[in-house]
Amino acid sequence: MAYGTGTTTIDFGVWPGSNEASVAVTGQASIAAVSNAEAFMMAEASGSHTIADATYAASFVTLTCSVPTPAVGFTIYARAQYTLTGTYALRWVWSD
């Protein structure tokens, strides 16, 4: 069973921001097209936001992962109910 874990940040941009953002996760040599990928927010600070900000953001941001590209990686898409600015820390995991 192959698997991978990691962290990244997703950027909603500068003011006025956006309610959509995406980030590519690459360098996953063992990932297959049939692998399952998942992304999530934890209560952790980023360059733009405090732990409290991340705690609240997780309640109105939906994260979706693309179907993996074999031996490359996948893309994490974020959609928020409100316009956001700056970066948020994400964690991700995939497995076969």
Image (tube, rainbow, N blue to C red):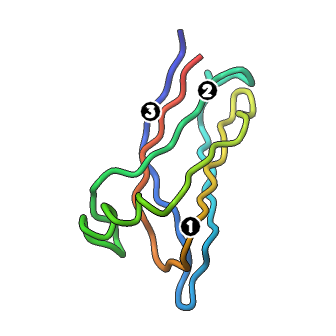
Residue depicted at x 69% and y 35%: 72
Vertical relation: 5 (above or below) 62: above
Task: State left or right for residue 44 relative to residue 37.
Answer: left
Q: Residue furthest top?
A: 1
Percent coordinates x, y for residue 17 in the rendering = 57, 83
Vertical relation: 5 (above or below) 19: above
Residue depicted at x 61% and y 26%: 36
Task: State left or right for residue 44 relative to residue 17.
Answer: left
The residue under label 1 is: 80
Residue 5 is labelled as 3
Q: Residue furthest left?
A: 51
Q: What secondary structure is marked by label 3?
A: strand
Q: What secondary structure is marked by label 2?
A: strand
Among the 4 quarters of the image, the one containing residue 31: top right
Amino acid identity at mark 1: Ala
* Other-residue count near label 3 (Cα within 10 Å), few / some / many at <14 / 14–19 / ≥20: few
Residue 36 is labelled as 2
Percent coordinates x, y for residue 35 in the rendering = 65, 22
Q: Nearer the viewer, residue 77 or 60?
A: 60
Amino acid identity at mark 2: Asn
Vertical relation: 68 (above or below) 45: above
